[in-house]
Amino acid sequence: MALSEFEIKKIEKAGAAFLAKHRPPLNIRSKLDLGWRLENQSVYIFEIQPVWNNPEEYQSLDIAKSTFVRSQGVWKLYWMRRDLKWHSYKPESQVTTIEQAFNVVSQDQYGCFWLMT
């Protein structure tokens, strides 16, 4: 079942708050920036940076994913490992709200999402 308009608005609000707190300063956003997107039942957090051999072109690199499982009423959290596959973020692999999901990524207690905290 698709997310409701209310749920989407809640995600948008939480995503905007996350970016307001974590985006780099304006003067370096052309070199490194953050974003998020909603695809079906999943919220992705990603870095945006220029392609190394073509600075006019940008690429997005996913760093975190949270998927809503309606039947369980939880958001499952994942991180992207070097093998470019999603892995459950343990020990906090699920939360009950999207705000908590963004907060877990923000805190990054185990150093999985951010290279430097």
Image (cartoon, rainbow, N blue to C red):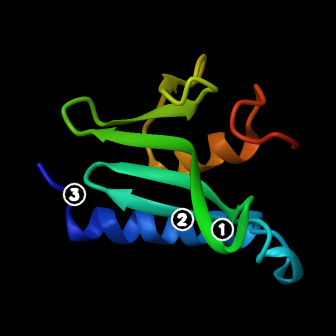
**Residue at position x 44%, y 70% in the image:** 12
Q: Quadrant of residue 17?
A: bottom right
Label 1 sits on a secondary structure element that is: helix
Side of 22 where 77 appears, left or right: left
**Residue at position x 55%, y 53% in the image:** 45
Which amino acid lies under the numbered mark 1 shown in the image of this protein? Leu
**Residue at position x 50%, y 31% in the image:** 78
Residue 114, position as x, y percentages in the image: 76, 42
**Is residue 43 shown above or below 92?**
below
Q: Residue most toward the bottom?
A: 26
Between marks 2 and 1, how big is the CA–CA gap?
A: 6 Å
**Crowd tier of the residue under label 3, counting other residues whose Cα lies within 10 Å: few below 14, some 14–19, many 20 or above:** few
**Crowd tier of the residue under label 2, counting other residues whose Cα lies within 10 Å: few below 14, some 14–19, many 20 or above:** many
Q: Which residue is mark 2?
A: 15
Q: Which residue is mark 1?
A: 19
Evaluate if marks 3 and 1 touch, with contact meaning CB atoms under 8 Å apart: no
Q: Residue most toward the left?
A: 1
